[in-house]
Image: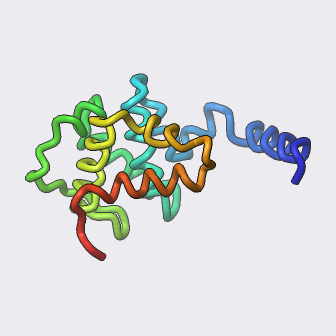
Amino acid sequence: MNKKELKSFLDEKARTFEYPKFLEQDPIQIPHRFVKKEDIEIAGFLVATIAWGNRKSIIKSGNQLVALFGSSPYDFVMNFNGNRALKFVHRTFSGEDLVFFIQALRTIYEADGLEAAFKKTAIEGIEVSITNFRNAMLETPHLTR
């Protein structure tokens, strides 16, 4: 696919999905509830993490996440007591998994933040950025599966 074909393809997708009615039926509605960059990033990242299954189920679980976090996912992550269990399940993603993700995100935000975690190696390509982000996440102690 050349650049012109890619632009055409992406423009068509934008026409299909970039309108308010679409948000009502899609999990992307959840990060749209927030204004602060870090809140949007965390809500978007965690909802994307559980985004398998049907959209209604993902939205329901995403709403449960937001209920846990209150008005600021960022404040929740930064002030989370790691010894606290969280009651959350979405398919095979459990409360224990969520605790790990929260602890890993806190470590990332204490460093440079989520955006910076990807930007550091963006020049080397998206594959390197994703690999480095994964490695940063896995520096936090986690369950072995």
Position of 145 with respect to 7 (left or right) is left
Please state which of residues 11 and 130 is positioned toward the viewer in this rendering: 130
Measured along the vertical axis of the image, is residue 132 above or below residue 42? below
Toward the bottom, the furthest residue is 145
Residue 101 coordinates in the image, percent (x, y) = 30, 53
Question: Which residue is rendered at x = 38% and y = 31% of the image?
Answer: 38
Query: Where's residue 8, x and y in %?
Result: 87, 42
Q: Residue furthest left?
A: 83
What residue do we see at 84% from left, 46% from top? 6
Q: Position of residue 85 (x, y in %)?
A: 13, 56
Q: Nearer the viewer, residue 4 or 91?
A: 4
For image coordinates 61% across by 41% down, the residue present is: 123
Quarter the C terminus occupies: bottom left
- x 49%, y 42%: residue: 118
Viewer-nearest residue: 30 or 116: 116
- Residue 44, image x and y in percent? 45, 42
Image side of residue 50 versus residue 110, left or right:
right
Which quarter of the rendering shows the N terminus?
bottom right
